[in-house]
């Protein structure tokens, strides 16, 4: 039986990523938490604020094979999944796998593709496999989709449907760097410069060992009461057409376990739920503007008392 990796492995990954994406400690930790939970990550922000750099840094530090796929309006599902091509020498069709068959898939500007192409990711993100031309093919393990999207107000974007949004465990926004972090970037002391020198700090086997520990994080009944109270508040809120589903509640609990693991604990606390609540719940409460969903999530969190 493989022994689990030491906690310092995760601490080293966080420290290394912080050296590339300056001033974004919370966002870096949430991205790693998402990977530990076997979830998928959606990053929404303006171009040029480090979305791609964060994705590439996480893939490099964890030693996972990454493929970047630029989503455009003319991208087809076959461009994502792959296609069979007839080989005249063999007199048969040979399957050529698409970029989805990598450990980390960076779906850049996902909302510039049509809904038909966006839906090509649904089975992959939910089941860890894809069905192409009637044959089901497994994807690598670990498998992690990091999608970036531009704000919906920008031209040439297609809103992600609720079914697609729900496949993402978290949605984040990096935002502008603070003055000190931006000064270091301008001096060439972060970003791409440090990304090129980033070492591999985990491998797939050790990452799987961490992921396997997630189910062992203890959740007390009182914490389940707190999670259910938050979910119930979202369903009863007059401004919301719908609240969190049971799948959303499970996602919240899984993310809280992941945050507890990052904190070095074998049990989850209300603080863990609170730390992940906004990125987990925001995009599930509103499929409109990101700020609207995040504001609703903060409002609900403030209304619901912590269960004793």
Image (tube, rainbow, N blue to C red):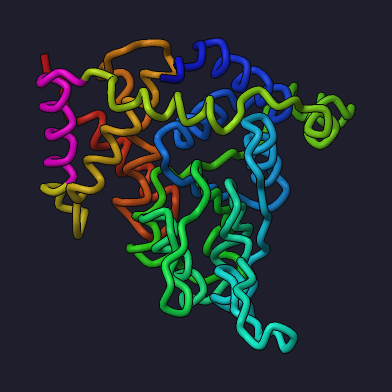
Residue sitting farthest toward the right? 187
- Residue 213 picture location, percent across and down: 36, 23
Residue 297 inside the magenta-drawn segment? no
Q: Nearer the viewer, residue 106 or 281?
A: 106
Location of the N terminus (image quadrant): top left
Location of the C terminus (image quadrant): top left
- Residue 303 picture location, percent across and down: 19, 31
Q: Quadrant of residue 182?
A: top right
Q: Is residue 134 above or below residue 223?
A: below
Q: Quadrant of residue 75?
A: bottom right
Q: Is residue 268 left or right of residue 159?
A: left
Q: Is residue 166 left or right of residue 175?
A: left
Q: Residue at x 83, y 34 (%)?
A: 196
Q: Which residues are magenta?
A: 219-234
Q: Nearer the viewer, residue 77 or 269?
A: 77
Q: Label the magenta part by its dominant secondary structure.
A: helix
Q: Quadrant of residue 296?
A: top left
Q: Is residue 285 left or right of residue 182?
A: left
Q: Residue at x 23, y 18 (%)?
A: 218
């Amino acid at each position: 039986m493989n022994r689990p990796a030491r906690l310092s492995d995760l601490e080293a990954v966080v420290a290394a990523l912080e050296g590339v994406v300056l001033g974004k400690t919370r966002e870096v930790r949430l991205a790693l938490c998402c990977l530990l939970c076997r979830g998928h990550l959606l990053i929404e922000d303006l171009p040029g604020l480090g979305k791609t750099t964060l994705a590439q840094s996480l893939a490099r530090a964890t030693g996972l094979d990454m493929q970047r796929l630029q989503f455009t309006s003319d991208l087809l599902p076959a461009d994502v999944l792959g296609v069979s091509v007839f080989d005249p020498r063999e007199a048969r069709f040979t399957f050529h796998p698409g970029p989805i068959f990598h450990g980390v898939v960076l779906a850049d500007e996902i909302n510039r593709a049509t809904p038909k192409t966006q839906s090509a990711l649904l089975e992959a993100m939910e089941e860890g496999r894809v069905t192409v031309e009637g044959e089901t093919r497994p994807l690598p393990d670990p498998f992690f989709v990091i999608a970036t999207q531009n704000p919906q107000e920008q031209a040439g974007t297609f809103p992600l449907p609720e079914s697609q949004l729900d496949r993402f465990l978290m949605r984040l926004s990096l935002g502008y760097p603070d003055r000190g972090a931006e000064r270091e970037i301008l001096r060439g002391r972060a970003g791409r410069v440090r990304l090129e020198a980033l070492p591999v700090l985990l491998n797939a086997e050790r990452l799987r060992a961490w992921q396997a520990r997630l189910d062992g994080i203890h959740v007390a009944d009182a914490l389940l009461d707190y999670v259910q109270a938050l979910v119930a508040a979202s369903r009863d809120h007059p401004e919301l057409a719908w609240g969190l589903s049971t799948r959303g509640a499970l996602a919240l609990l899984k993310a809280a376990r992941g945050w507890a693991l990052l904190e070095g604990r074998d049990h989850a606390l209300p603080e863990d739920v609170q730390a992940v609540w906004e990125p987990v719940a925001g995009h599930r409460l509103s499929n409109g503007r990101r700020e609207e969903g995040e504001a609703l999530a903060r409002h609900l969190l403030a209304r619901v008392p912590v269960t004793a």
